[in-house]
């Protein structure tokens, strides 16, 4: 029997805050310090846990799951660790287990989904909430209750290796997708069966100097609030997000991990966040080691704790015994520690961990993982994520008409290419290869395998013309083991085209300039009726990837081995379609000039090959839309559609040069772009009134008709422009969007409803203001393909609370 059964904190009927206050009064300082640190199990015993965490730990890092065989082994290990942590704690306080969930729970047997930029390309918040619900159920079933996602960083720089984790460049799109995702993870606020959603990385992380991971962020205060904070504010206001992780970067001389200005005054004060703040891995110690604003690790810990950081992850480096001694000696107020511990305890009570700290019974776990909706939702997300960038009429392919199909490229025969960074495959990929780019993690220490066991030499070969290491063939073997029903694209094409002769040639790698296998591939192409090229890099961790965490570049195009092959292939004049797999979008002069059709597939997950072939052969009509603007080259960066009036490709100066000397100013492909196998007409746009008071709802309606011969979905996009304002405003801003399914010749009416607070901005005094003036309205198929325009007037000024402003339009389709 629990000796604390009569303690007030054990009464599950009481509010979490009241229970936390009661428990906090009973705890020793040693037990409190245990609650504000993480524990990262290694591949050995847990004796180190007892030694380093004598009073338990607040959180447990789940990266060890990459070395486990199945969900049953996860359940066993979570139960074992939880038992030990509760046993060590004087009050049997359970730990929160956290896991990365960007593309699904990073656990064996968990369902895989497209990576973040692919999810954004669906432009479908409803689907986003559904997949988040699957992630929640699978993670919670095995005892995990803290989800590290969504990634709410806005990325306007494809040099930055983590672009593929984001929802793209636009704050309204990220706000809508992120809010849906958080609602799904947190079970609409019922955390007893939900998870803490942890949004990252607060704030401005992807706008770094030089596009370099963790470099300083030169972002001005207005842009920081209006643009980069908008998705975070939306999920706080609309979904009551419970957790936030900091950026590695510094802003205006302050490392965010140790900044009271950003973590307390801005995040908690201005933005009203009341959840749990946890550190990105080793970001507190980097205040000392990298930013050099703290002379010791303990000084860094003191700075961070005072700034408002509740939990140090992944392990105890700065929230250490010396810091505890400073608190005991009165050099640091005990109230600062108590505030952090209280928030940790509130989270644990809200999650119901004191009543149910363990994984579910095996039958329940099996039922959740075997749900057929898991596969159906993953496949649908993959289909919706794929963007048809270009099509001169080649797609869709007719199965019976293609007698000889040539499939060329590394990615076509690689299941790994279907998975992106922060997927489960990238985790054991990192554990089983040499070279790490993920901060704060020594994979060899936590993996059950090591390099020598895995047949990997320390002197890895690199692809010619590149520093990228050649991946071990064992990676593919492991993916086959963990995803036995996952076909790579070549296998799926053979399966889909039983009457065709499908031939394959490797042709080229995903990095470097090796052309030694071009001639063989060209011969295969020459004998074919149609050629399917696979292009792109590799999205993941480590020295064997071309994009991912800590893997940045100055070349945003295809590697030379691919670009030069396209040039050679063009001489054959074969009908050619390219499928691009990567964490950043395709940018290729040769592809634009010579390839007939281009699919941007990103990293679509375990059912990605099926999704791609469904589109190639017309079984599914693509409706993915770009969540980023695609530059011609890195010299245009940063390039984004919602730039300021009189800037970027709308600079408008009196100059006869309307482009760079060597490149257009405009994007290669515009934000919101994506093609279909049918066509759509926009008509009858109306704005409900000519003038509005700042408290009235603005209603915009438009009819959309499928004028083609096949079913399709149109992503209807609403943009606004403040025609004249007291500060420089964007040339256009996404205000709302919706996917509209339409049968041939069907017409549906889309109604957008906007609160004028959605048009508010920070005035010259940095006060949120709805300003009187004319607002232009534009509806269309992309930021560039505008089909209808209108306008209305706001009659008077109104100052508002920015926390509760509008973030994106409500939409109804009838």
Image (cartoon, rainbow, N blue to C red):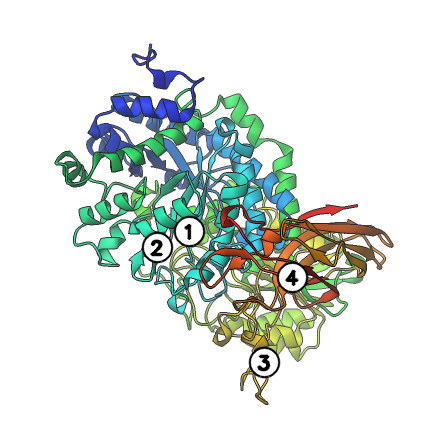
Secondary element at image label 3: loop
The residue beneath circle 2 is 248
Q: 548 or 764: which is nearer to us?
A: 764
The residue beneath circle 1 is 201
Specify which label sits upstream in the sequence, 2 or 4: 2
Secondary element at image label 2: loop
- In this view, 646 is above or below 429: below
- In this view, 196 is above or below 282: above
Residue 652: mark in rendering: 3
Q: Position of residue 522 (x, y in %)?
A: 62, 73
Q: 207 or 363: which is nearer to us?
A: 207
Specify which label sits upstream in the sequence, 3 or 1: 1
Alpha carbon distance from label 2 to label 4: 34 Å
**Which residue is most to the right?**
745
Mark 3 and mark 1 in contact? Answer it, CB < 8 Å. no
Q: Residue at x 65, y 61 (%)?
A: 720
Q: 698 or 250: which is nearer to us?
A: 698
Alpha carbon distance from label 3 to label 4: 20 Å
Mark 1 and mark 2 in contact? Answer it, CB < 8 Å. yes
């Amino acid at each position: 029997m629990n000796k604390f059964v009569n303690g007030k904190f054990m009464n599950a009927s009481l509010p979490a805050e009241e229970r936390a206050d009661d428990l906090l009064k009973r705890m020793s300082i040693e037990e409190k310090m245990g609650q504000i640190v993480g524990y990262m199990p290694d591949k050995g015993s847990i004796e180190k846990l007892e030694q380093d965490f004598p009073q338990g730990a607040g959180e447990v890092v789940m990266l060890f799951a990459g070395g486990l065989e199945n969900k049953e082994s996860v359940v066993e290990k979570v139960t074992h660790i939880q038992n030990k942590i509760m046993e060590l704690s004087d009050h049997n306080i359970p730990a929160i287990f956290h896991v990365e969930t960007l593309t699904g729970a990073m656990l064996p047997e968990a369902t895989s989904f497209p990576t973040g930029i692919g999810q954004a390309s669906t432009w479908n918040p409803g689907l986003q909430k559904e997949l988040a619900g699957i992630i929640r159920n699978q993670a919670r079933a095995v005892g995990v209750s803290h989800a590290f996602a969504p990634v709410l960083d806005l990325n306007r720089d494809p040099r930055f290796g983590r672009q593929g984790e984001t929802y793209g460049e636009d704050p309204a799109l990220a706000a809508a997708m992120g809010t849906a995702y958080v609602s799904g993870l947190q079970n609409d606020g019922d955390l007893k069966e939900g998870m803490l959603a942890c949004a990252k990385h607060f704030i401005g992380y992807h706008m770094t100097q030089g596009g370099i991971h963790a470099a300083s962020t030169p972002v001005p205060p207005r842009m920081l609030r209006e643009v980069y904070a908008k998705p975070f504010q939306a999920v706080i206001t609309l979904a009551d997000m419970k957790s936030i992780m900091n950026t590695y970067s510094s802003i205006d001389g302050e490392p965010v991990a140790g900044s009271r200005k950003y973590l307390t005054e801005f995040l908690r004060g201005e933005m009203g966040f009341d959840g749990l703040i946890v550190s990105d891995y080793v970001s507190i110690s980097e205040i000392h080691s990298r930013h050099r604003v703290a002379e010791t690790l303990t000084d860094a810990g003191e700075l961070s704790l005072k700034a408002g950081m509740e939990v140090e992850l992944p392990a105890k480096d700065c929230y250490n015994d010396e810091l505890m001694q400073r608190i005991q000696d009165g050099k640091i107020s005990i109230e600062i520690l108590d505030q952090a511990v209280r928030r940790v305890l509130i989270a644990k009570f809200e999650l119901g961990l004191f009543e149910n700290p363990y994984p579910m019974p095996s039958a329940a776990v099996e039922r959740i993982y075997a749900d057929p909706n898991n596969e159906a939702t993953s496949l649908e997300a993959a289909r919706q994520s794929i963007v048809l960038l270009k099509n001169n009429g080649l797609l869709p392919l007719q199965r019976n008409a293609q007698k000889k199909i040539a499939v060329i490229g590394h990615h076509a025969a690689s299941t790994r290419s279907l998975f992106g960074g922060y997927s489960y495959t990238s985790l054991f990929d990192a554990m089983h290869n040499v070279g790490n780019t993920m901060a704060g993690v020594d994979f060899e220490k936590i993996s059950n395998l090591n390099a020598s066991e895995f047949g990997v030499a320390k002197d890895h070969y690199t692809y010619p013309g590149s520093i990228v290491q050649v991946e071990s063939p064992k990676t593919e073997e492991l993916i086959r083991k963990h995803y036995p029903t996952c076909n790579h694209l070549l296998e799926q094409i053979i399966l889909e085209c039983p009457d065709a002769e499908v031939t394959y040639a490797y042709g080229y790698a995903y990095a470097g300039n090796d052309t030694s296998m071009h001639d063989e591939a060209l011969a295969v192409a020459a004998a074919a009726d149609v050629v399917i090229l696979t292009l792109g890099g590799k999205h993941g961790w480590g020295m064997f990837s071309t994009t991912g965490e800590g893997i940045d570049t100055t070349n945003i195009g295809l590697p030379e081995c691919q670009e030069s092959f396209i040039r050679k292939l063009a001489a054959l004049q074969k009908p050619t379609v390219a499928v691009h797999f990567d964490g950043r979008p395709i940018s290729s002069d040769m592809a634009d000039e010579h390839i007939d059709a281009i699919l941007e597939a990103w990293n679509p997950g375990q059912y990605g090959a099926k999704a791609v072939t469904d589109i190639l052969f017309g079984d599914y009509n693509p409706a993915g839309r770009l969540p980023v603007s695609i530059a011609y080259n890195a010299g245009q960066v940063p390039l984004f559609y919602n730039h300021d009036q009189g800037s970027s490709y709308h600079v408008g100066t009196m100059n006869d040069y309307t482009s760079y000397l060597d490149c257009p100013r405009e994007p290669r492909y515009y934000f919101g772009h994506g093609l279909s196998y049918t066509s759509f007409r926009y008509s009858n746009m109306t704005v409900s009134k000519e003038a509005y008071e700042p408290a009235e709802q603005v209603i915009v309606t438009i009819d959309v008709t499928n004028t083609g011969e096949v079913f399709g979905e149109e992503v209807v996009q609403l943009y606004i422009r403040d025609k004249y304002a007291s500060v420089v405003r964007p040339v256009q801003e996404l205000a709302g969007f919706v996917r509209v399914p339409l049968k041939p010749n069907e017409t549906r009416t889309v109604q957008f409803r906007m609160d004028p607070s959605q048009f508010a901005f920070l005035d010259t005094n940095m006060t949120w203001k709805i300003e009187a003036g004319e607002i232009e309205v534009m509806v269309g198929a992309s930021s560039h393909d505008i089909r209808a325009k209108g306008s209305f007037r706001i009659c008077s000024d109104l100052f508002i609370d920015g926390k509760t402003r509008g973030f994106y339009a409500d939409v109804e389709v009838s």
